[in-house]
Image: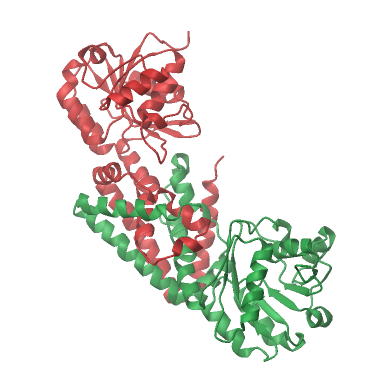
Chain colours: A green, B red
Amino acid sequence: MFVDVSKKILIVGLGLLGGSYARVLKRFGFHISAITKEQSSVDYALCEGIIDEGSTAPDKTLIGEADLVIFALYPHVFVEWIEQNQSLLKSGALITDVTGVKGNIVYKIQDMLREDVEFIAAHPMAGREVSGVENSTDKLFIGANYIVTPTEKNTPQAIQTCMELGRLLGFSNVTTLSPNEHDEMIGFLSQLTHCIAITLMTCNDKADMEKFTGDSFRDLTRIARINEQMWSELFLENKKALLDQMNLFLDKFNELKTMLENEDVHGMQDMMRQSTARRALFDKK
Amino acid sequence: MFVDVSKKILIVGLGLLGGSYARVLKRFGFHISAITKEQSSVDYALCEGIIDEGSTAPDKTLIGEADLVIFALYPHVFVEWIEQNQSLLKSGALITDVTGVKGNIVYKIQDMLREDVEFIAAHPMAGREVSGVENSTDKLFIGANYIVTPTEKNTPQAIQTCMELGRLLGFSNVTTLSPNEHDEMIGFLSQLTHCIAITLMTCNDKADMEKFTGDSFRDLTRIARINEQMWSELFLENKKALLDQMNLFLDKFNELKTMLENEDVHGMQDMMRQSTARRALFDKK
């Protein structure tokens, strides 16, 4: 067999991501259990056949039997869970996560964790504008990036296993970055773009604009529909890196504004040519 | 007959927009002629059967016979054309345009134009990332907005005819705005969004970002591939309105930055809730 399906996997937090993990991993034949807040999520997942067992409590048996535990929780809930329940983890268990920020979380968890359990952090860069296990799908990860963020505390085996997990889940691109590189990159590509979208959406409340909206404005504000609980927490957990990226953006935007004020056509055209050339790098391959 | 196809239409500037106008109007049976810079564009359009006659020179017969002249030129080229060739227009002709900025153009043209010719301005809000008559299509206007921008110099008949033209072309939404309302609206919905996209695309030149790009960043930078000749001219022609919109955006962006610096979670969440609510207005109907 190529995949050791005798390993038991526990998913903590059965929402859109946790549910999608369960769907794909169940297909391979793993024993999947889940611990999550709402009984309705457990019922739904059992009924759909995407988990074998589930509980809304930190069930000793489910936790104690798991070889791999995947945490799909808000950052502060993840930290609290480890504080309160890590004594229940099986000796030798591997734990991983889906958290969208790393520097503030990875070292905190690794520092507090038992010596006989290893935490290898990962960020599955996939999502939808809807949430909940009911919206989970086994196609969520196709074409997406999965980033493993090891530290010097991680073993080569754990890094290897986590990357294999990303490939089993169907991610098209599985790579590693340090936690800080990850946070800088995500601050730019994901968090700054959300800051821009919500700013654009709220900076001008003139009536009837929607009657004249074209595709440009719709594209730039698709992500302006945002889960305020999750994103405010992600922004705060990545405060320094995000502020750096916001300042980079502001400097350049002010540069463009000055060029327009001074009617510096050549400067504006240079910036547009750079923009066009650089955008070509980001076309979907 | 519902449509008076005995009217002769001249299109000046046979690119993506001019060519798409020709395609749709030819289908109704109008006599369509075109004047454009490149002989290859004339040849292509004749070969495709989307124009009846064409020339690369300001041909006296083509201009003198046209009941309706549609200018699909860069703003400064349009103004120069009128200065040099308006004596050739037929008495009683109606002229219209596709220019993306209005205040700086409409009054200038109307003030210099012969008394027996009327200019009614319009902005077809449609485009593609490719240009040229070879990329023109008769589907370009479906779902898009067509805005007529009359002044006190325009007759009710000309406004009516121009709106009928928008409907014949297939635009889903045909409305009127004053030139200044138009410029404010386009400054926000179109020009500010392009400013943001090119800033985002050029503010951080860290290598390998494209390996980790998700849909958010791709969405926000689709329009960062930009025709620098056209857009630098459009920005300058709408300088005041665009600077106003850039300042509105900057004020709000700095507000968000201050909230993040102060860890004002409630302030950030309020802004995100507003953003989510307002974005719902802009969903495609």
Residue A182 vs B51, above or below: the answer is below
User: Image quadrant of residue A134?
Assistant: bottom right
Residue occupying image coordinates x 19% and y 16%? B88
Residue A115 vs A39, above or below: the answer is below
User: Image quadrant of residue B230?
Assistant: top left
Task: Give residue A86's position: percent from left, percent from top.
Answer: 71, 86
Q: Is residue A78 left or right of residue B128?
A: right
Residue occupying image coordinates x 50% and y 31%? B142
Task: Give residue A79's position: percent from left, percent from top.
Answer: 63, 82
Task: Give residue A274's position: percent from left, percent from top.
Answer: 31, 55
Residue occupying image coordinates x 41% and y 52%? A280
Q: Is residue A204 visible?
A: no
Q: Is residue A21 left or right of residue B164?
A: right
Q: Which quarter of the rendered picture does the N terminus of chain A lie within?
A: bottom right
Q: Is residue B168 left or right of residue B180?
A: right
Residue occupying image coordinates x 63% and y 56%? A142
Q: Nearer the viewer, residue A80 or B202?
A: B202
How many marks the image carries: the answer is 0
Outermost residue toward the front in this view: A1
Q: Is residue A245 left or right of residue A54?
A: left
Residue B190 vs A239, above or below: the answer is above
User: Image quadrant of residue A12?
Assistant: bottom right
Q: Is residue B231 visible?
A: yes
Q: Nearer the viewer, residue B40 or B271?
A: B40
Outermost residue toward the bottom in this view: A115
Task: Give residue B85's position: percent from left, percent from top.
Answer: 17, 21
